[in-house]
Image: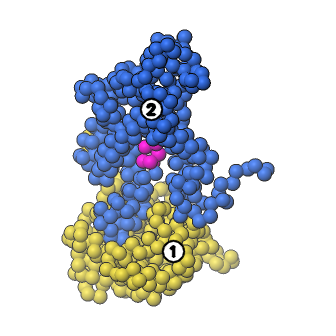
Chain colours: A blue, B yellow
Amino acid sequence: MKKTRQPVKQRPLPGNESTLRLLWQDPMGRAGMIGIGLIIIMAVFAPWIARYDVAQMHARNRLQGPSAQFWFGTDNFGRDVFSRIVYGARVSLVVGIVAVGIAAGFGYLLGMIAGFFEGKTETVIMMVMDIIFAFPSILLALFIVAALGTSIVNTMIAIGIVNIPVFCRTVRASVKTVKSTDYIANARSIGLKRMSILFRHVTPNVMAPFTVQATLALSGAILTEASMSFLGLGIQPPNPSWGSMLSDARKYMEQAPWLVIFPALFIIITILSFNILGDALRDVLDPKLKL
Amino acid sequence: MSEPTRDKLLDVQHLQVYFPIKKGLMKRVVGHVHAVEDVSFSVHPREVFALVGESGCGKSTTGTAILRLIEPTGGKVFFEGRELNSLSEEEMRLKRRDMQFIFQNPYSSLNPRMNVWKLLSEPLRVHFNLSEAELRERVEEMLRLIGMTPDQLERYPHQFSGGQKQRISIARALITHPSFVVADEPVSALDVSIQAQILNLMMELQQEMELAMIFISHDLNVVRHISSSVGVMYLGSIMELGETEEVYRHPAHPYTQALLSAVPSHDPLHKSKHIVLEGDVPNPASPPSGCPFHTRCSRCTAECREQKPALTETAPGHFTACHHAGAPKA
């Protein structure tokens, strides 16, 4: 029984350790962090990593398979797939982070208000959220982009808006749970002001599900961007995004499968990393598991 | 029991707490749970007053409503001669420095994300303007009183045992040096072996800090041990009220008699007659007419079904709400 995992014993003074360190000690958390780290490095150092310009066409080398010259092959215009994937990481990450930022920011605020103040405010907020929620997210995002015009900023806004209800609901639910706990009644009996209770007692206890939701939503946002680009309403050519690369590759899938395999692989790696990081984060943020 | 007098620290008059029952799509109020029907009693400075009764009788609700942690629907509560329900939210908030609440379950009443230092310094920060050094001094003094050491300040609640958690919880309530505290079954969530320790600690602190206390409990032995006066509650009303020893020796209300007969004796040869109550506690959403206890009482008469008995003095300082108060007929 030597190989049994004993994460409990390794942790010295629990509760005082940083979340990042605990995350690193968790095998799943570490895998997620490494995956995301690689994608971030790729995005940040894209000009140095990419071997060609994303728009540069090698007319004589169209639809070439993977080789020493073109690691991931070339597309129907003779553009280097590897370089396009490297630059595509920028789009995916920026879209993911900004969109989730919008969604999380508004969702958090609305969820807090709805959960803490209740009454009519809550009814109205949740009604609007339910209406947004009722639409299939892709359809709503497409509709918003169609109304605002196709650009990368509008894509981010659209994905952001679509994701607000999820955050709003998560935060509201946790606020309501936390609000009915004894320690909030305790804070009241001590004589704390309402705002102090909200910021000192409710917020820290809501952060855990919120953070987890954020990592999960990141992968969702990247996926939505890929789907929208696939449908032609996301990133506009010649700028690459993983989704638009997949979309362009559709016609050549049988002759040149690498055009599909590599962008898809990177989408999968990114989303998987975010998802397992989210799962690990949920475990790590639970104070009761830090025994 | 009409005018608040000076020697009473706390005077509760006709306290009433109803919870609305809402039903349907429009959340229409279809009825009320009569959690606390009509409760009056008073607590003197440095006195321990116990509220006993079975679960669901409204004793905890009474305690929380006195401190306005839930708003009472009727009645008046005077604290140091001031009526609490007439205070604004902000005035009430400041008043909480002098009147605190000790929660039943220390496992849930301490914020899991705050360490002991934060938990204990918070009440002081709210009510006093102290320097960090003074804060530290006050917190360490309190730690000493509850039998803990300063090296435990950095720890979080989940790293303590139930008994230690309750010590922290008590310290958090008493660190502002209140004159009055409501303790809501402070030991019932703990192991029996720990209960005595915590009770002794509370009695020491009560003496040392000259506290007046409402001690809510369903444990009759604990109540006899700790309190000087007692109120027996049933279905939201006080059935019997008086000095603890007097009530325990000469219970006049049939409900109190039944309760006390259920307490096991220390003497194995002593054969006590158990009074076994039949039936269940009525639903507090539709309480019975007349005396709340009449559905289960052996002395029930027509009068009991129609008219609710008032608390009347059956012996000096001993009040009973029963038309047929007195010792049980043999």
Mark 1, residue position:
B153
Residue depicted at x 65% and y 57%:
A8
As displayed, is residue B120 above or below residue A40? below
Residue depicted at x 32% and y 50%:
A112
**Secondary structure mainly formed by the magenta segment:** helix
Residue depicted at x 50% and y 24%:
A81
Nearer the camera: disc 2 or disc 1: 2
Where residue A199 sits: x, y (%)? 35, 60
The verdict on residue A263 being magenta is: no
As displayed, is residue A177 above or below residue B255? above
Q: Is residue B274 visible?
A: no
Left/right placement of residue A103 relative to residue B259 reads: left
Where residue A212 sits: x, y (%)? 47, 45
The type of residue carrying mark 2 is Tyr
Mark 2, residue position:
A87
Q: Nearer the viewer, residue B147 or B226?
A: B147
Q: Secondary structure at mark 1?
A: loop
Quarter of the image with the N terminus of chain B is: bottom left
Where residue B324 sits: x, y (%)? 39, 72
The type of residue carrying mark 1 is Leu
The residues colored magenta run A209-217
The verdict on residue A214 being magenta is: yes
Q: Secondary structure at mark 2?
A: helix
Q: Residues within 10 Å of mark 2 (few under 14, many from 20)?
A: many
Q: Quadrant of residue B197?
A: bottom right
Q: Is residue B122 visible?
A: yes
Q: Nearer the viewer, residue A13 or A62?
A: A62
Whether marks 2 and 1 lie on the same chain: no
Left/right placement of residue B204 relative to residue B126 reads: right
Q: Quadrant of residue B53?
A: bottom left
